[in-house]
Amino acid sequence: MTTVSPTPQPAMRLRELVFGAACAASVRAAVRLGVADALGDAPATAEELAAAVHTEARPLQRLLRALSCYGIFEETDDGRFAHTEMSRLLREDTPNSLRYISLWCTEPWTWEAWPRLDEAVRSGRSVFDDLYGKGFFDYLHQDARDSAQVFDRAMTTSSRQSAQDVAELLDLTGVSSVADIGGGQGHVLASLLEKHPDLEGTLLDLPHVVADADRRLRDGGPLASRATIVPGDCRSEIPVQADLYIIKNILEWDDESTRLTLGNVLEVARPGARVVIIENLVDDSPSMKFTTSMDLLLLLNVGGAKHSKESLVSRMSEAGLLVHDIMPVNAYLHAFECSVPG
């Protein structure tokens, strides 16, 4: 009798990893079908869920079985499917939902870009111009408007989730004014103004971005009297003086943009002003699989890069900032506490 040796764990794990696209595609399918929203607190059969989301039962059962292998949904002993902590994050109504992040990371263009990662590694630049004849953001807003909307919702969701963490982390003793540089819709600024009733703040970002600023900051909003919205490009000029400057997730596009942004802060800021730079890191982070994946996606789509602690400290020191402390914001963000030399 011939015995079959068990498959070595490394070989099985590698087989699972090279089928990673199947997992990502399954998550995307579940979100687009609305399976997590259709499933309530009680387990349901594939037939019941299929009727709710207007699919065939057998293929849906196969999809849910595959997702259950990753802990996204759970198959019960009687063949029903129930929610897990991860599957609930795919619901529209869940606090801190990852629905739009899941869609963004699996948008149609990603399936065209990922197979060309070797080209990006060889050249060190984005593959987007070669793929679509134009840059990433031009492509999104001109040719893939649905994807652009998903991107906007994903970034809004992510920003809102981290804004509270930033507001809880920062000690604003002695700070009367804060400037959120490249702050998107201003979720971080709004969270800080809500927590500190005597604080005044300025949001600076591109005109089309701040045109859709957080409603709390706009005319008629509860924070509008303490907020100033400035349309502009931080790489060109930062016409704002403040006790504290916050720069979050914008030093990842390219070194020249980083140099210009930090240089403009140093040019306008008063001696002793605080500068807090918040970024994902590709080292010394509990979310390394996530941040290193984002790093490669940045290489593909815009030719950018996530930072290591060393590379970010180097950029800040070269700009003339004094780096004092590095603090974890949450599992995937770090804050670098700096100051402008006196």
Image (tube, rainbow, N blue to C red):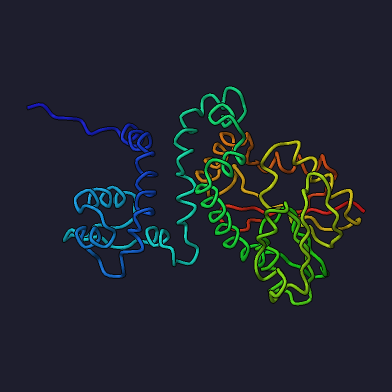
**Quadrant placement of the C terminus:** bottom right
Front in this rendered view, residue 74 or 230? 230
**Quadrant placement of the N terminus:** top left
Q: Quadrant of residue 272?
A: bottom right
Q: Quadrant of residue 196?
A: bottom right
Determine whether, in the image, residue 159 is placed left or right of residue 9.
right
Return the x and y of residue 89 as percentages of the image width and height: 42, 60
Q: Residue at x 83, y 70 (%)?
A: 176
Front in this rendered view, residue 155 or 277? 155
Q: Residue at x 38, y 39 (%)?
A: 20
Front in this rendered view, residue 27 or 212? 212
Q: Confirm whether residue 336 shows in the render.
A: no
Question: Residue farthest to the front?
Answer: 142
Return the x and y of residue 45 as percentages of the image width and height: 20, 61
Q: Confirm whether residue 77 shows in the render.
A: yes
Determine whether, in the image, residue 23 is placed left or right of residue 326.
left
Q: Quadrant of residue 317?
A: top right
Determine whether, in the image, residue 272 is placed left or right of residue 56.
right
Return the x and y of residue 80 as percentages of the image width and height: 21, 61
Front in this rendered view, residue 341 or 260? 260
The answer to whether 283 is drawn above or below residue 187 in the figure is: above
Q: Residue at x 30, y 49 (%)?
A: 69
Question: Residue farthest to the top?
Answer: 122
